[in-house]
Image (tube, grey):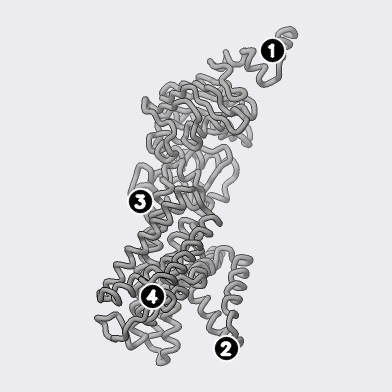
Amino acid sequence: MLEVRKLSKRFGGLQAVRDVDLDVAAGSITALIGPNGAGKTTTFAIIAGFIKPDDGRVRLAGQDVTGWRPDRIAAAGMARTFQITQPFAALTVAENIRVGSYLRCRSPAEAMRRARSIGEELGLGPQLDLAAGALTVAGRKRLEIARAFATLPKMLLLDEVMAGLNPTEINEIIGLIRSIRDRGVTILLIEHVMQAVAALSEHIFVLAEGAVIAQGSPQEIANAPAVIEAYLGKGAAERMQRHA
Amino acid sequence: MKRAIVIAGITAVALAPFAFNSQYLVNIAMLTALSAVMGQAWNIAGGFGQMTSFGHAAFFGVGAYTAAILQTRWGLSPWLGLPASFVTGGLLGGFIGILSFRAGLRGSYFALVTLAFAEVLRVLANSLDFTRGGLGINIPLKQGLANFQFHNRQSTYALVLLMLVLTTGVAMFIKRGRFGARLVAAGENEDAASALGVDLVRTKTIGLATSGAFTALAGVVYTQTYLYIDPSIAFGVERSIEMLLVAMIGGAGTIAGPILGAIALHAVAETSHFFIDAPGFAPLLYGATLLVIIGFLPRGIAGLGARWSRA
């Protein structure tokens, strides 16, 4: 579904993303993890069209979308959420979701009907008529997902939708992401909550200092020395081995 | 029920000037309604799309000059001035929009660009022969419906009222539709809107062009009422500030806001004449009013209504 090749981006003296290759199979849930500052969010922003890469290609379902504007990428079927939630504060929750519905629907009444039904489905039913600014953190995260899902994407990029949530809320969101995937949407997620990454993803890419240092199943990643070192520092894998 | 009372109240206020004998009062009513038209037009860009323009006089002036030049140079009917100004105002809005939004200007940068456009147009109108420079343009007095010149101020008021109904209708139509929702989204948060498929440059440019087109109509009515236009009347900063104040005092982004704001602003200005009639006092008062509104009623008078109906 998504194919990223040799993606690179430099900000001044900082090589934020270096020759990143990613492959996300259609219908899968794939995770992108890595320590803070590894370049995950920058990679996301490039894929979704918010930052132009210095080099490399992004292909969505076979179509080259490198350097396209975000709205054209959304129209091509790839939606994203933001790590720092960005609700339209003056609008109600339902109206927020409707902005997403309008991408595939011209009629205000039909767009509203779709928006409300997506809101109900994603557990925002009781809040649909509240101002979006009044939502709790968990509510805002749901709204981010609902709005993106309302654009009827083929592929959904989720940027840390579980950060700041309590364990119960995390479990709910895990169920919600599964149900979206079961509707045929391919998912790529950035996440720090390892409980969620392990529970959800079929394939994991690990990013450190802008480059992919490992990839594989959750099991493979948990044991990969390069990953342990990226998180815990040089020599950590060896020390762990010795103590084991 | 509540709605019916509100509508009846608005209709009564709107129709009252037809019963006035004093042309002075009718003139105030006409200027208030004209402010409301401009505020409503400003609101489409500045309220819905949060494109806070400080230079909407550019559109007013272009509308006024379009109508004035068409009839004095080419003898065209001033009624043609309405559609012609609508087009020139819209084109100017499209031009400013494409330039500013492609460059990613927003907030105070956009405000400064619009202010600069209005000032450039003022200087141009002041120095070009085509606009008769600083002398301004006199429209020959030829009263009659065919010439869009009315002996009776009440007729002008009726026309402005019609324009207010039209502009308000257009604003309502935009607000309820797909375009309006996307315009509001682009105004609220550009990144989030574009992630949901909103083409920012296109949406905001169309918003500004629509706003400019309706603002230009007000310029035509002004010219036909006072039969004289010069660069500072047309493009002066006061005009831009008036539109912005009307919308913000009433409640930017709401439909009733510009109408309430126009009534409030003119009521304050006219009553203040009785107490202090010094030049420069009115702008001072406008500034003070705006500060009070921003401090205590950030959502304008219309926001107050929402607070009451919720309580």
| Mark 4 and mark 1: Cα distance apart in space | 83 Å
Instruction: Determine which residue is flagged by label 4.
Output: B132
Residue A209 image offset from top left, x and y in percent: 62, 24
Chain letter of the residue carrying label 3? A
- Mark nearer the viewer, 1 or 2: 2
Taking the spot 36% from the left edge, 85% from the top edge, the residue there is B154
| Mark 2 and mark 3: Cα distance apart in space | 51 Å
Residue A123 image offset from top left, x and y in percent: 50, 40
- Mark nearer the viewer, 4 or 1: 4
Residue type, numbered disc 1: Ala
Is the C-beta separation of discs 1 and 2 under 8 Å?
no
Instruction: Determine which residue is flagged by label 3.
Output: A109
Q: Is residue B17 visible?
A: yes
Farthest-out residue, bottom: B21
**Label 3, residues with CA under 10 Å away: few <14, some 14-19, many ≥20:** some
Instruction: Determine which residue is flagged by label 1.
Output: A237
| Mark 3 and mark 4: Cα distance apart in space | 52 Å
